[in-house]
Amino acid sequence: MNTSETALPKKFRVHHLAQAKEQGRKLTMLTAYDSITARIFDAAGIDMLLVGDSMGDNVLGHPNTIPVTLDEMIPLARAVARNAPHSLVVVDLPFGSYEDTVEHAFASAVRVLKETGAHAVKIEGGQRITDQVRLLTQSGIPVVGHLGFTPQSENVFGGKRVQGRGEAAANQLLDDATALQEAGAVAVVLEMVPAPLAAAVTEQLRIPTIGIGAGINCDGQVLVWTDMAGMGDWSPRFARRFAEIGAALQEAAQDYATAVRDGSFPAPEHSYDE
Ligand code: KIV
């Protein structure tokens, strides 16, 4: 039995975030978009499941996250939350559902918590959305921030590009991170940020940083599960492929098709006599 102070909590909840940072225990987060992956990752002891708007690319077949709507996110988030008894479930507020007013952000976040059973929302941006973070936090809705390459602003960045390079951009990112913390964010995702800058943000904040393409010194890591599991032909440079599930699944489907065509499936044991 692990009796150390850093033993995994049975149910990972928001208050464990600060605790993990204090104890120096690395946080784990993976995206999940359905009940099957939610069950598997929850059983694997992943601290946080992110129902990311990356479901736009990974489930709906869009080129990016921009077309995703709240109505599309909600059923997926519900499926994940119902099937993850131990992990903290965080849901992205999609593009267009929170940026313009605090009222819009509040209405969207309330829908997520009421209709899905998730525990927290994630929104992209720094100082420009701190009013939203403050109101949600004061209303009992935990918020995870997201800085660096924020996919919903891909059109402003001109593609999927590393952010925070150069002194001015680095200082801006440090200020944005502090602003999110002071507004009440419970953690901040840092995406595609130079590792030394991510380390400086991590050092500066009391709340944990969760890196994706942001180096080893973040308080935790997040990956899109399809990248982590090797589902497609390609994964981004920052994502290690911990398995080759895509190739294994294709082989299984080919074996199935061959067995149906050659008459070896279904066998007697797969059939009912009466
Ligand atoms: O939507 C998503 O998957 C994300 C991760 C890249 C952090 O926001």
Image: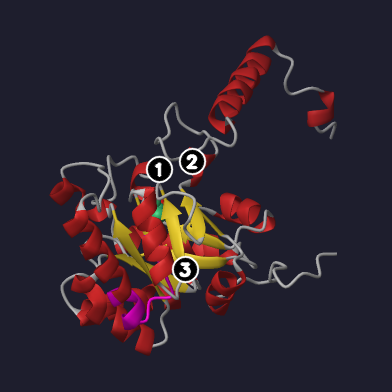
Instruction: Describe residue 260's horizontal placement relative to residue 190 as left or right.
Output: right
Disc 2 designates what residue? 226
**Residue 62 pos. (x, y %):** 29, 42
Ligand 1 under 8 Å from disc 3 Cβ: no
- Above or below — where is 208 with respect to 264? below
> The N terminus is located in which quarter?
bottom right
Indicate which disc residue 58 carries.
1
Q: CA distance from mark 3 to mark 2?
A: 24 Å
Residue sticking out furthest to the bottom: 138
**Is 217 situated left or right of 126 in this image?**
right
- The amino acid marked with disc number 3 is Pro
Mark 2 surroundings within 10 Å by alpha-carbon count, few (fewer than 14), some (14 through 19), many (20 or more):
many
- Give the label, 1 or 2, closer to the camera: 2
User: In the image, is residue 229 part of the stretch drawn in magenta?
Assistant: no
Q: Which comes sooner in the sequence, label 3 or label 2?
A: 3
At label 2, which amino acid type do we have?
Thr
Mark 1 and mark 2 lie on one chain; the one further toward the N terminus is: 1
Please provide percent x and percent y for residue 126. 25, 68
Q: Which residue is mark 3?
A: 208
Region of the chain picked out in magenta, as a range: 179-189
Q: Which mark is first along the chain, 1 or 3?
A: 1
Q: Is residue 273 above or below residue 58?
A: above
**Which mark is in front, 3 or 1?**
3
* Mark 2 element type: helix
Q: Can you see residue 53?
A: no
Task: Please tell me which residue is depicted at 42% across the width and 64% down the height of the picture.
Answer: 202
Q: Residue furthest top?
A: 262
